[in-house]
Amino acid sequence: MTTSSLFEGPLPAIVEFLENAFLQPRPVPPLQVFLDVRAALFAREMPDEDPELMLRALIQIARACFYAAQPREGLITLERAEQIMARLPDSDWKRQVFNIKGGLNSNLGDFSRAFDSYLQAAVMARQLELRDAQARTLGNIAALFSAFGGY
C-alpha cells in the first residue's frame, strides 16, 4: 500500500502505519508524510466507534512533530486529540497526549503550559497506577525545571 492510498484507507491500517514508523529501523518517514496523513484524517468524518484509534493516530503524528522539532504542528494535532479525548474514559492514551503536549510546550519555551500538561499526565498515571509512566513524567517535570532554571 502506498502512502497516498493509505490516506483514504481504513483507520486501523493508518494507525498501524504510523505506529510502525517509530518501531522500524530508521529512517523514520519525513515529517511531511505525517502531516499529509493528519490532513487526510482531519478531512474525513470520524466514525463514532473508532475514537480510540483516531486518538492513537494523532498521538503518533504529534510524536513525529516533537522529534522533528515542529512543536506548533504537534500542538495543532493535539487540539484535535483533546476533542476526541473528551468522549473517552481515562487511559494511557490520554496520558500520552498530556505528556507529548508537555514536551511540545517545553520546546516552545512555555514553562507554565508544559508544567500543567506534565502535571496532568502525572496525575493520570498515578490514577491508572502506571508506575513507569509516572516515573517518566516526573523525570520530564524535573528536566523542565532544570531547563528553565527552577532547579
Image (spheres, rainbow, N blue to C red):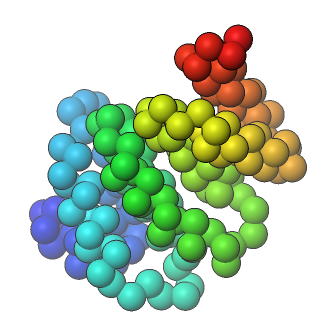
Relative image position of residue 41 (x, y in whole percent): 33, 73
Residue 34 position, x and y percent, is: 27, 55
Q: Nearer the viewer, residue 3 or 76?
A: 76
Relative to 46, is 8 on the left or the right? left
Q: Answer yes or no: is residue 58 visible.
A: yes
- Quarter of the image containing the N terminus? bottom left
Quarter of the image where one finds residue 99: top right
Residue at screen point 37% across, 49% down: 72
Q: Residue at x 22, y 69 (%)?
A: 6
Q: Quadrant of residue 114?
A: top right
Could you say where residue 70 lies in the image, as x and y percent from the top left? 32, 42
The one of 11 and 83 positioned closer to us in this rendering: 83
Which quadrant is the C terminus positioned in?
top right
Instruction: Using the rendered image of the protein, determine whether residue 132 is visible from the camera's viewpoint.
Output: no
Residue 28 image position (x, y, % from top left): 25, 38
Q: Total of numbered circles in the picture?
A: 0
Q: Is residue 37 above or below residue 22?
A: below
131 in relation to 84, above or below = above
State the residue in front, 144 or 29: 144
Left or right of residue 35: residue 137: right
Placement of 72 over or under 37, stated as above or below: above
Q: What residue lies at 74% left-to-right and 41% top-to-bottom?
A: 119
